[in-house]
Amino acid sequence: MNNNSTWEFGTRQVVYGAIGAALYGALSWFTNFLAIPAAGNISFRPAVAVLIFFGVAYGPIVGLLAGFIGNTIGDQASGYGFYWNWSLGNGLMGMVPGLIMASITDFKAQSQIIKAVGWGVLGIIVGMLFASLTEMFTSGIDMATAITGYFVPTLISNTINVAILLPILMIAFAGMAARRGR
Amino acid sequence: MLVTWKYRPRDTFIQRLDPRTRFIVLLCTIFALTIPEIWDYRFMVPLFLFSLTQFLLARIEWKDIRRTLFFVFILVFFIIGLNGLLSGRGGPSAALDPNSPIIYQALIPGTDWGITITISKLWFAMTQVLRILAMALPAMALPYTLDPNIYGTAFKRMGASDKVAFTMDLALRFLPTFSHDLTITVDAQRARGYEVEKLKGGVVEKIRKLAPLIIPVTMQSTVTGEEVIDAMDLRAFNTAPRTWLKELHYAPRDYFMIGLGVAIFLACCVLKWGFGIGGFFVPDFFTKFILG
């Protein structure tokens, strides 16, 4: 299903990076009302599964662009402003699962879905750890608050979202791709 | 349901500014608050007024922006404000000062767990709301006052590569389309008895129930993508450096605004790092006011 090299940056990556960003931004805005109680300014984002799906399906460049631009758009539409570290963290969250794009050949095979979810969780760990730890410099919080107030809530909520929605997205994508023949 | 922002040409000072100027001033405001970690209300209030002035100068009609403002204020006041008030998190550790006088406390009997609202947490929540609004107000006005056709050119002229500039350009163009698709999907699911406002059950159940909204919109977008790729390939995108139709030129007002933005940023950095002014503290007048 994937014929491109992992780090190719051509028309396909530009278009799907833009689509991923717009979807991530729109869906994040739509679900921003689902806040995580008592966690530092973090909302519950089922759209994370869409971001990781774009990384897995279209590669790390698409994941990076979709996460960075999508988070910026979502935060702006929600009125949060612009937080470069969270945007970059979201970019990393989309980029890391994109590293396995070339090895995902069958989107409805159980083993490949499990692999995608595993790399998705790794992406969440890398991206959210980066964003949480850089909050120490931007907000002046201590390490304990960064970990317990930001990293752990986002890790748990994003992992749940990805574990539930990513398999559904992959199976739906496999069916649609089979119908379209591309 | 979703805000599909509408750009409209208006003859205002803000719209006459070069788009690069607006991005640079916005970044200066954000960086002035975040890089030197400014939490002092004496900085925050003038910066908030600076942002509010820009927002008002944009003269966005109330009927256009009222829904956005409604949702944004709910998010800022209830999510960010309440989070700051109850947890004190999302800011400097001084907001969690254990010696700050307690205004309200409700603990689970026999434990230290519960709600404790202190004066420093209350002041922090108010500061946090002001800080977020100072950064958000100019950003909120952008979609209403910046021609979507100019985003790509602006990013390109600010140093982004053709492909990155075009990705940003496309993303901002796709956003209203996908928002519209999401609204149509929600309406279609409602017609089948789906009630998005009444998502019951636990967290897992709520996420599962969002699938009928997220999956169709995502799948439709991938189909749209293939069509856009074909159209761009037919126009030989990515075969040579692009030329951009729109030209951007700075005017004296742009130099003035950029100078002002840079001066604000530098002043915040110098005062914080050079003189140690700008950190979080609770002013005496606020403590006296609360304690009577």
Image (cartoon, coloured by chain):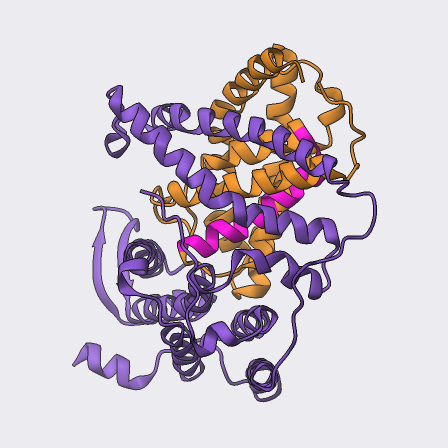
Chain colours: A orange, B purple
Observer-nearest of B69 and A149: B69
- Position of B18 compared to B53: left or right? right
Judge by depth and name the residue closer to the eye, B227 or A78.
Answer: B227
- The reply to whether residue B136 is in sight is yes
State whether residue A181 is above or below residue A61.
above
Q: Position of residue B283 (x, y in %)?
A: 34, 83
For the point 77% across and 53% down, the residue is: B242
Q: Which residues are magenta?
A: A58-78
Judge left or right: residue B26 versus residue B292: right
Picture quarter containing residue A16?
top right
Q: Can see residue A126?
A: no
Work out which quarter of the rendered image holds the N terminus of chain B and state it.
Answer: top left
How many numbered discs sit on the rendered protein? 0
**Residue drawn at point x = 32 percent, y = 72 percent:** B123
Q: Which residue corresponds to the image point at 23% horizontal and 46% vertical from the top-left?
A: B108
Residue found at the far left of this picture:
B292
Magenta highlight on residue B33: no
Residue B85 location (% of width, % of height): 31, 61
Quarter assignment of residue B101: bottom left
Q: Position of residue A77 (x, y in %)?
A: 43, 53
Figure check: A51 above or below A140: above
Is A114 on the left or on the right of B58, as rendered? right
Q: Residue at x 37, y 71 (%)?
A: B130
Dominant secondary-structure state across the stretch colored magenta: helix
